[in-house]
């Protein structure tokens, strides 16, 4: 009888431990699709925001275009070649504030389209070699620009910070971080997405924005009432656009970097810049 009781207690303990381990296992983050899964499925899932021309733009029909989109197609051709299997791209829409969590949740294999190399991202993810240089500039309404012209970068930011101008910030990326760090006292609107700032600037509902030179140059062509007052801030804030993968995607990273070395990036760039 005692032996039976001890056995039951023993079985219960094992059952308890199994339940605990199952709980631990289920609470682990989903592991990224690895290289063999990409090859097996014949699909490379590319996360992109579709709101950052000329790098990534999604139209009303859900079609994507831009420099990063052409690069993704070129990457899939290369991956098809090295794997000996057709690998096509599937674009998955993401948003700047959700970019990190979407990648962590394994919604896509790689994020492409204007992602800046940062220390924080370097710790959390695998980042490709640098693709194109980038840096911040101030985009302002032409008629408000004169008092800010010719100032050095820090003086310009200080003067903007203490001005009564209306700043518009797009959420979730390095622009927001820059604005919080250098322009914390400005009156500002936090836009709902990356399209709203340019609508607001076009409609004169905002005076100024800080963004990447790549995007500023593109928007100047669409909104002639704007100007860039400090192109040299680009060098002061220089950073690089990269492609971002989950921490465990070592094989994909290796192939992405090989492809970057072999690809005529300048030729692809010419269509968009
Ligand atoms: O988060 C980043 O990596 C970016 O550089 C993206 C970012 C941003 O900083 O908000 C850069 C410029 C565009 O306005 C849109 C997004």
Image: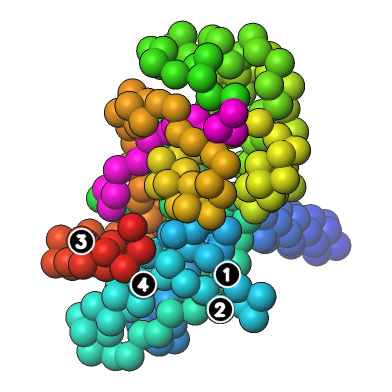
Could one spot residue 151 in this view of the protein? yes
Instruction: Say what secondary structure mark 2 lies in.
Output: loop
- The residue drawn where x is 78% and y is 59% is 12
Residue 257, image x, y percentages: 22, 59
Of labels 2 and 4, earlier in sequence is: 2
Q: Which secondary structure dominates the residues rendered in magenta? A: strand
Q: Are marks 4 and 1 in contact (CB under 8 Å)?
A: no
Residues in magenta?
A: 130-143
What distance separates the C-alpha of mark 2 from that of mark 3?
24 Å
Q: Which residue is mark 2?
A: 63
Q: Are marks 1 and 2 in contact (CB under 8 Å)?
A: yes
Colouring scheme applied when the structure was drawn: rainbow
Instruction: Say what secondary structure mark 3 lies in.
Output: helix
Q: Which residue is mark 3?
A: 266
Q: Are marks 2 and 3 in contact (CB under 8 Å)?
A: no
Query: Eyeballing the image, is 272 above or below 77?
Result: above
What distance separates the C-alpha of mark 3 from that of mark 4?
12 Å
Q: Are marks 3 and 4 in contact (CB under 8 Å)?
A: no
Asked whether mark 2 and ligand 1 are closer than 8 Å, the reply comes as no
**Mark 3 neighbour class, 10 Å CA radius: few under 14, some 14 to 19, many 20 or more:** few
Quadrant in the picture for residue 93 = bottom right
Q: Which residue is mark 4?
A: 70
């Amino acid at each position: 009888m005692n032996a039976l009781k001890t056995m039951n207690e023993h079985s219960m303990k094992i059952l308890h431990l199994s339940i605990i381990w199952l709980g631990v296992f289920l609470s682990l983050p989903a592991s990224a699709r690895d290289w063999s899964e990409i090859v097996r499925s014949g699909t490379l899932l590319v996360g992109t925001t579709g709101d950052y021309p000329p790098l990534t733009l999604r139209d009303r029909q859900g079609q994507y275009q831009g420099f990063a989109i052409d690069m993704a197609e070129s990457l899939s051709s290369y991956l098809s070649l090295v794997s000996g299997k057709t690998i096509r791209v599937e674009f998955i829409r993401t948003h700047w504030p959700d970019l990190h969590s979407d990648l962590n949740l394994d919604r896509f294999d790689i994020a492409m389209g204007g992602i800046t190399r940062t220390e924080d991202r370097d710790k959390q993810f695998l980042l490709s070699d640098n693709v194109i240089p980038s840096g911040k500039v101030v985009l302002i309404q032409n008629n408000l620009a004169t008092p800010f012209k010719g100032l050095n970068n820090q003086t310009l930011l200080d003067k903007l910070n203490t001005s009564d101008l209306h700043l518009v910030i797009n959420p979730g990326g390095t622009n927001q971080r820059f604005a919080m760090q250098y322009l914390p006292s400005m009156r500002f609107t936090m836009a709902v997405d990356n399209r709203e700032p340019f609508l607001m600037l076009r409609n004169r509902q905002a005076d100024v924005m800080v963004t990447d030179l790549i995007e500023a140059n593109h928007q100047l062509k669409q909104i002639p009432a704007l100007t860039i007052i400090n192109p040299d801030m680009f060098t002061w804030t220089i950073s690089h656009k990269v492609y971002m993968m989950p921490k465990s995607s070592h094989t994909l990273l290796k192939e992405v970097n090989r492809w970057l070395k072999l690809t005529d990036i300048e030729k692809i760039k010419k269509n968009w810049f």
